[in-house]
Structure formats: structure tokens, C-alpha cells
Image (cartoon, helix red, strand yellow):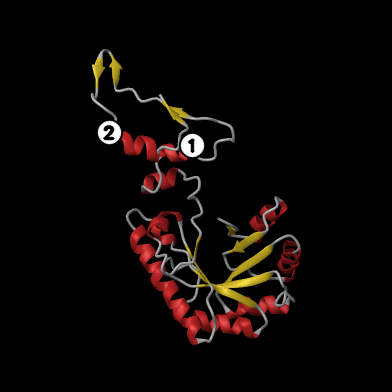
Amino acid sequence: ARGLTLATVGEAECFAEAGFDDLLIAYPVRTTAAVAERLRRLLDKATVVLGIDSHEGVDALVRHGLAAHPRLSLLVEVECGLRRTGVVPEDAGTLAAYAVGQGITVDGAFTFPGHGYAVGASTAAAEAEGRALAGAVESFAAAGLRCDVVSGGATPTYEATDTTIVTETRPGVYAFGDAQQVALGTARVDDVALAGRPAGMAVTTHMCRGNFRSSWVAEGGYDFVAEALFNELEVDGYF
């Protein structure tokens, strides 16, 4: 894994200050003079990729002198069903070509299948993500451009990502999980509880099949729980 995806310039500033130097600001930035100055300072510390979904967004970068910055590039955002931001896939190449014509580097395209956060919607959302990004790649090709970065991902859709299309995935809460992911079935309570434990902390689990008022639950070997017990639980020991 490399790089971080952020929503705002402010978030990117915080992570750059902490030493992270490969940052994608996915939500389209409204580049005013003040924001442009913040971006310049940010670019002194990190390589920055901006999500873009309009000609106006490109024009603002040009107007404020950021177009030719060697550490700045763009990803064209395409819409795949969330209906929040992004161009339709067939327009991605046109927007990318416009940006390139203004002297800005365009690395590829991305989308966010956030509608996969509805219960039971993750597989359909991942399929929509794949279709949208495939359309973007075709649109880039029609405009005579390469689409080297094909970026997708949301935590609920991660397991269903079409890796024949997607070259980069951004599952934001996948590393740690949270209560929402437990509710959606993409993480387990024990996964969330164990995530982010300090280095040097050993965690073990104790499995007892009885002994409550001399009652018992099971007998025999551990074969029927071995897969979950030894290959799924992220613990350091068993007793």
C-alpha cells in the first residue's frame, strides 16, 4: 500500500505535516487565490493528486499558476451511481484532454462507489464501479490519451473489486474497520477490536467448551472450528 486519499486540503495539510508525501485529494477543490497558496505550500512537502470533474476546476488551477507544477497531477472523477460528484464516463477523456491542453498532467481516472454503503448493495456498487471505470478508459483512448491510473474503492465494495479494470483501490476504513462495517458485514467485531493495537502487545484467545455449572457445549477435536480459530482470528496465541 502507498499514499493516502483525503477529502479536503486541510486534511492533506495535516498528513503532510506528519510526513506523508503521496496524497490524493479526491473531493473536487474550489481553487481560490487563498486555496492556491495553501496548495503551493502543500506541494513543497508532498506529491499531490487532485480529483477534477469540471472545466472550471481546470481553469482555476491555470488561473492561479498551478498548472505546470511538477508535483501536481490530476485524476478525472467519473460518476458510478452515488450521484454526488464526477462526470459521466464517456466525458472523462474530453475533460482529461482539456486539462492536458492547459499543461496539467493527468494520471487517469477514479470513482467512488459510496452507494455500496447501503446494506446488501456492495456487489452491485462494485459492478457499477467497474463499468464506469471501463467507460472512462475507453473515453481516454478515444481522446488519444493513456489512462494509467484506474482508481476505485470503498470499504464495503473492496472484496468485489474488478481487478481486471481497477489498478488502484482506496478502501478507506478497511485497515481498521468500525461499527458501520460490522453492521454491513464487511468486518467482524473481533477484527475491529484488534485493529491498531500497539506494537509489542500480544493478544491471545481462550476457547473453553464447557465448565459452566458442569455443562458442556461440544466434545471431540477442534477440526470444526480450526479454520476460523487458526486462520481468521488475528491473535498471537491460543490456550
For label 1, the crowd category at 10 Å Cα-Cα, with few meaning under 14, some 14 to 19 and many 20 or more, is some
Q: Quadrant of residue 179?
A: top left
Is there any visible trace of residue 81 in the rendered image?
Answer: no
The residue under the point 68% across, 58% down is: 21
Image height check: is 231 above or below 207?
A: below
Quadrant, the C terminus: top left
The residue under the point 68% across, 53% down is: 14
Q: Quadrant of residue 95?
A: bottom right
Marker disc for residue 223: 2
Tell me the SS state at disc 1. helix
Image height check: is 78 above or below 156?
A: below
Specify whether 75 is left or right of 226. right
The residue under the point 72% across, 72% down is: 70
Residue 229 x %, y % = 36, 34
Which amino acid lies under the numbered mark 1 shown in the image of this protein?
Leu
Is there any visible trace of residue 116 in the rendered image?
Answer: yes
Residue occupied by mark 1:
194
Q: Mark 2 and mark 1: span between their CA atoms? A: 24 Å
Number of numbered discs visible in the structure rendering: 2
Specify whether 70 is left or right of 125. right
Specify whether 140 is left or right of 222. right
Which amino acid lies under the numbered mark 2 shown in the image of this protein?
Asp
Image height check: is 56 above or below 165?
A: below
Return the disc, 2 or 1, that comes first in the chain's sequence.
Answer: 1
